[in-house]
Amino acid sequence: MPAFRLPYEDELRAERSRLIDTVEGLSDDDFDAGTTLCTEWAPRDVLGHVIGLDYLTSYLPYGIRINAANQAQADRARAVSRERLMEWARHWAASPSTTSRLGATILLGDLGVHHQDIVRGLNLKREVPDPVATAIFREGLQLSLWLNRRVLRYRLVPTDGHRPVALPGAKQEVRGTREALGLWLTGRDSVKSELDFA
C-alpha cells in the first residue's frame, strides 16, 4: 500500500470496503438476481462494473461506447463464481489501481451511487458517510449535464449541509438530501418521492 495518499483516496478505499460488506451480507439469490436501481443489473453485475473501472485499458476497444464497455465488465463478473468475484473484489478494495487513486475524486461519487443502487434496490438501509453523500451529489451534478439536463432547470437545495446549486436559467427548486438529489440527477427516479419540488 503506497505511503503517499492522493485526495479522496482514503475515502475511496473505505467506501469500497463498505460495498464489500454490503454484498457479502447478501443471500446467493439476492447477489445473483436481486433488484438494483440499475434495472438491467443484479448486485453481482454492479460489483463487476465498479471493479472494472480499475482496468481502464479494458474500455479502449469500445471507444465512446461506454455502456457497452460497462456491460462487458458486468458480463465478465457474471462468468465467475461468487467466491472468485469476492476474492477479486477484496483485492480491488484494498489495492486501487493507480488510475483509480488519481481519479478518486470522481470515482468516489460513482461508487457511492452504485452502492446505493444495491442498497436501495434491495430495500436495505445504511448510513451514507458525509464525504460519500457529497460525492454522490457532485456525481449527479456532473452526469445530469449530459444525461437529462435537470441541473440546468432546477435550483438544487441540499437539506443536509451543502450550499445550494443554481445554474443560470434554473426556474424551479428542488430540496432533499445530497444522496437523494444526486441519485435523482443521475436519473434514479425512484427517489423522487423523497424530494420537495417548488
Image (cartoon, rainbow, N blue to C red):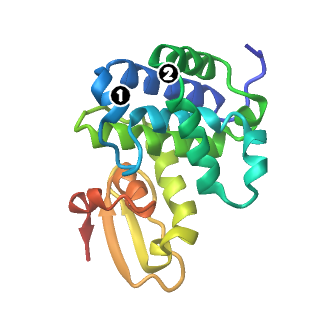
Residue that badge 2 annotates:
17
Give the image quarter of residue 145. Answer: bottom right
Q: Which residue is mark 1?
A: 31
Mark whose residue sits in front, 2 or 1: 1
Q: Residues within 10 Å of mark 2 (few under 14, many from 20)?
A: some
130 vs 12, nearest the viewer: 12
Name the quarter where the N terminus is drawn: top right
Q: Position of residue 109 (x, y in %)?
A: 53, 45
Q: Tag 2: residue type?
A: Ser
Secondary structure under badge 1? Answer: helix
The residue under the point 34% across, 75% down is 173
Does residue 53 appear to the left or right of 140 in the view shown?
right
Label number found at residue 127: none
First-in-chain label (2 vs 1)? 2
Residue 49: x %, y % from top left: 55, 39
Residue 45 x/y as whole percent: 47, 37
Instruction: State how far apart marks 2 and 1 are (Cα).
Output: 17 Å
Comparing 12 with 56, the one in front is: 56
Label 1: how many residues lie within 10 Å, few (<14), some (14-19) or many (20+)?
many
Q: Is residue 112 left or right of residue 55?
A: left
Position in image of residue 101 (x %, y %): 72, 32
Q: Hey, what amino acid is under mark 1?
A: Phe
Q: Residue at x 28, y 56 (%)?
A: 191
Residue 140's place in the image compared with 114, above or below, is below
Q: Is residue 148 left or right of residue 61?
A: left
Residue at the location (38% across, 38% down)?
Answer: 42
